[in-house]
């Protein structure tokens, strides 16, 4: 009786242990300086909770899902690193359980396949070179998409309209992080229609896929309606569709680059290269001899991932995080398939153990690095300097004073906790693109109203030479009395100036 109970709860025990391992690994980099995307989400969420309006006041190029997620975390854990740590481990553990069930489904219900997949995910989930130890958008996309895949694959045995609605809801929520997620529904839904489960009519399967698409449509109609009722539809639509189309460029060209240019096709994570090459050889051999529908779904998901990586046209390292759950699931599936081909079964288990040890061998050294070194290896000194400079800014300004940062370093607002004088953060949109005039006028109006005491100028020679509208206005208002920056190397990235006729300028002149 006791042995049966232990056997029943063994997978849950392993998953809880792996979850604790992930939490411990994330805690190791708790004090790492955050990169700019995370700071943008955190600051915008904080300002939303303070009553500022998304898109018509606060402006960034993402759909609302990421800001709502960060706002929810702030309500639970407060404004600061605690909320980011909470998001980090919750998303990773949700994905961990999804990977377990995906690995189990891929292997026909074998829990060992799910456990090997989960173990692989626990190691890959914090990959340094893919910036995977911090909760950027892809972390939350993975948490949704792996469960979409689970529901599709489990549909082989027991599909229902309820599952179709759940798939639609998960896809819809994921599209509120990035709209490109819809690619997954088209590819997995198309695969489902082509390779129908036994005894399922195509008409019924088509109805189920239409329910999924309809659910996504209802969610987005609700989002459109929300912004329309509040009088912010144009601001929302211009940001999410007009500007993002300009930002990404040609979707066809981006996809072709992502699928056929080797340096865009393969993610930049050489630390994983050798064990994953071995895994790829195993997978390739097995898939050639396997006609199982679950593996076809695996391949369809792989194609969807690379298209999603390619669509924005930027190929940033963190985009490739979308591959990690799928690779982990493929690892668990490959081990089970290998056990069917090569007897006795302990040989496949030995292969799995060797590969897990190899992954650990390649990953453990990065946990010997201090958190600041993680940031330096990923981004250079930039975000370290940003965090240190924030302390200097805080010391120069009074509590009710603020500053404006021209650039992309919203972390200065986050670390100082001085409220931003304008809600338009990506200054690239103030230089080029379809919304230059509209956003520039909004920024100037915000700055005139709030009169920030200090200007932080992000060095960019080409921008300084061309002087877009907002920058011309800034140069007419801020005194060229450089403030000495004590943070090492900060002057390589930033210059700090005082507002003409302001309190800070008078203090600087007295001290000088």
Image: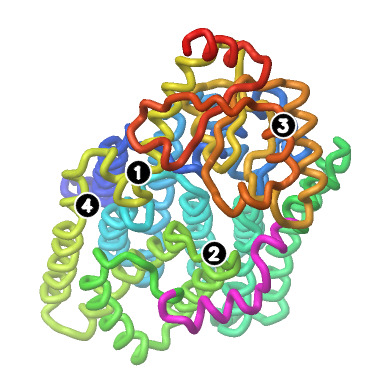
In this view, the mark in front (1 or 4): 1
The location of residue 359, given as percent across then percent down, is 20, 62
Residue at x-position 27% and y-position 67%: 270
Residue at x-position 41% and y-position 76%: 263
Decide which of tag 1 and tag 4 comes sooner along the chain: 4
Above-or-below relation of 96 to 51: below
For residue 259: magenta?
Answer: yes
In this view, the mark in front (2 or 3): 3
Assess disc 1: are there few (<14), some (14-19) or many (≥20) residues with their C-alpha within 10 Å of its C-alpha.
Answer: some
Pick the residue in front: 49 or 433.
Answer: 433
Q: CA distance from mark 2 to mark 1?
A: 22 Å
Residue designated by label 2 = 314
Q: Secondary structure at mark 4?
A: helix
Decide which of tag 2 and tag 1 comes sooner along the chain: 2
Q: CA distance from mark 2 to mark 3?
A: 35 Å
Decide which of tag 1 and tag 3 comes sooner along the chain: 1
Residue designated by label 4 = 7
Above-or-below relation of 478 to 349: above
Q: Which residues are magenta?
A: 243-263
Q: Residue 476 has which mark? A: 3
In this view, the mark in front (2 or 4): 2
For residue 295: magenta?
Answer: no
Q: CA distance from mark 1 to mark 3?
A: 31 Å
The location of residue 387, given as percent across then percent down, is 41, 31
Residue designated by label 1 = 381
In this image, 357 relative to 174: left or right?
Answer: left
Q: Residue 275 has which mark? A: none
Hey, which quadrant is residue 25 in on the image?
top left
Above-or-below relation of 75 to 457: above
The location of residue 147, given as percent across then percent down, is 49, 57
């Amino acid at each position: 009786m006791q042995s049966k109970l232990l056997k029943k709860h063994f997978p849950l025990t392993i998953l809880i242990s792996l979850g604790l391992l992930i939490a411990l690994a994330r805690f190791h980099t708790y004090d790492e300086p955050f990169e700019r995307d995370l700071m943008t989400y955190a600051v915008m969420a904080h300002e939303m909770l303070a009553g500022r309006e998304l898109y018509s006041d606060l402006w960034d190029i993402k759909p609302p899902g990421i800001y709502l997620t960060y706002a929810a975390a702030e309500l639970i854990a407060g404004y600061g690193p605690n909320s980011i740590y909470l998001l980090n481990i919750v998303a990773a553990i949700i994905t961990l359980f999804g990977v377990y069930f995906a690995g189990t489904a891929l292997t026909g219900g074998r829990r060992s396949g799910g456990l090997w997949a989960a173990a692989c995910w626990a190691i890959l989930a914090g990959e340094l070179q893919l910036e995977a130890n911090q909760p950027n958008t892809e972390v939350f996309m993975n948490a949704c998409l792996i469960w979409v895949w689970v529901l599709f694959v489990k549909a082989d045995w027991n599909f229902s309209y309820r599952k179709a609605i759940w798939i639609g809801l998960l896809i819809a929520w994921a599209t509120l992080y990035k709209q490109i997620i819809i690619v997954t529904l088209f590819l997995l839904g198309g695969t489902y229609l082509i390779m129908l489960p036994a005894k399922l009519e195509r008409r019924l399967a088509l109805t189920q896929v239409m329910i999924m698409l309809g659910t996504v449509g209802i969610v987005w109609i609700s989002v459109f309606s929300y912004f329309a009722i509040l009088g912010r539809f144009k601001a929302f639509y211009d940001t999410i569709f007009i500007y993002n189309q300009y930002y990404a460029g040609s979707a066809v060209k981006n996809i072709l680059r992502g699928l056929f240019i080797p340096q865009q096709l393969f993610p930049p994570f050489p630390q994983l290269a050798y064990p994953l090459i071995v895994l790829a050889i195993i997978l390739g051999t097995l898939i050639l001899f396997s006609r199982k529908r679950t593996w076809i779904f695996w391949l369809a998901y792989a194609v969807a991932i690379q298209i999603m990586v390619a669509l924005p046209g930027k190929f940033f390292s963190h985009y490739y995080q979308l591959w990690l759950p799928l690779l982990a699931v493929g690892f668990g599936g490959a081990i089970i398939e290998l056990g069917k081909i090569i007897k006795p079964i302990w040989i496949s288990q030995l292969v799995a153990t060797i590969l897990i040890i190899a992954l650990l061998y390649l990953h453990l050294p990065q946990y010997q690095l201090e958190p600041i070194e993680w940031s330096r290896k990923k981004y250079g000194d930039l975000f370290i300097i940003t965090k240190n400079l924030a302390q200097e800014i805080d010391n120069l300004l009074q509590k009710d004073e603020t500053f404006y940062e021209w650039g992309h370093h919203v972390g200065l607002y986050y670390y100082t906790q001085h409220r931003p004088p304008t809600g338009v953060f990506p200054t690239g949109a103030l230089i080029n693109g379809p919304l230059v005039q509209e956003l520039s006028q909004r920024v100037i109006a915000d700055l005139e109203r709030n009169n920030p005491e200090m200007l932080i100028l992000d060095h960019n020679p080409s921008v300084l030479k061309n002087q877009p509208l907002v920058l011309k206005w800034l140069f007419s208002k801020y005194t060229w009395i450089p403030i000495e920056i004590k943070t090492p190397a900060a002057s390589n990235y930033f210059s700090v100036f005082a507002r003409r006729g302001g309190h800070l300028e008078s203090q600087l002149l007295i001290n000088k």
